[in-house]
Amino acid sequence: MAFITLTPENVMSEHLCCAIADKKHQTGVNDKRNWLAERIKEGHVFRKLDAQGKVFIEYAPLEKAWVPVTGDNYFYIYCLWVSGSYKGKGYGKELLQSCIDDAKAQGKSGICLLSSKKKKPFLSEKKFMLKYGFKVVDTINDEYELLALSFDGTQPQFTSNVRKQSIEGKELTIYYGVQCPYIPNCIEQIYNYCENNQIPLRLVEIDTLEKAKQLPCIFNNWAVFYNGKFETVHLLNEGLLKKLLLR
């Protein structure tokens, strides 16, 4: 099967494979399209299999990536996802290789991404990336890791603010973007649950590159604090929120 790279001409019509035929996520899909339309102008790449499946890679120049990571002349991979019946067919390898080839063709210094010591949902799998030469170049709390494939020996790193992993407020606080189509529905579920149960909630939309670079924690498009402490980058629905609040 062929791969399709989204462009300003097709971003509003092509199928966004990370939210398939689920009505509750259509608001998120529309938000994602609009966000992508602006980011593509900055060099952001969304490449997917030409199929109705979750098979894609999404990356951007690190200087323009909405994450608190710094480095010169790198690509940052937000997401590399192959799911369901498409697994085991080499699509992940092809997509990653296309990113590596793109980086070399543009004279980049390397590629980096957020991962973790132990496998976590919504993060690229460390084991897979190590096979292709990626190495751990920075860590947070011996849990979250910045992986990089360097072509020239230079290395990116988390910004100094990331190491705080804490904020002053004690209420449930969520930093979020609209890059992921699942986020608006998660926000709706969390807002409704907190409203109905008198749980203090602070929602902070990260709607500029500058805000993203200054965040006090790791962030791919979502970050949760509770009692002033960073908890997770895992998207929360009502069920997962209940478990978090009971800990």
Image (cartoon, helix red, strand yellow):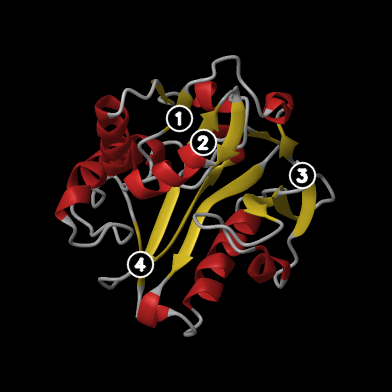
Q: Residues within 10 Å of mark 1 (few under 14, many from 20)?
A: many
The kind of residue tagged 4 is Lys
Please tell me whether mark 2 or mark 4 is closer to you in this view: 2
Q: Residue 67's image quarter?
A: top right
Q: For mark 1, what is the residue?
A: 174
Quadrant of the frame with the C terminus = top right
Q: Residue 82's image quarter?
A: bottom left
Q: Counting residues from the N terminus, which is met first, the one under dot 1 or under dot 4?
A: 4
Q: Position of residue 35 (x, y in %)?
A: 33, 37
Extreme right residue here? 153
Residue at 60%, 39% (x, y): give it.
Answer: 62
Q: Answer above or below: position of 182 versus 49.
A: above
Extreme top residue here? 168
Residue 235 visible to the viewer:
no
Q: Which element is circle 2 on?
A: strand
Q: For mark 2, what is the residue?
A: 223
Q: Answer above or below: position of 81 versus 186.
A: below
- What's the CA distance linking mark 1 and mark 4? 26 Å
Q: Is 56 positioned to the left or the right of 71 in the image?
A: left
Q: For mark 3, what is the residue?
A: 139
Residue at 47%, 37% (x, y): give it.
Answer: 245
The kind of residue tagged 2 is Ala
Q: Position of residue 212 (x, y in %)?
A: 53, 27
Q: For mark 4, what is the residue?
A: 54
| Marks 2 and 1 close (CB-CB < 8 Å) | yes
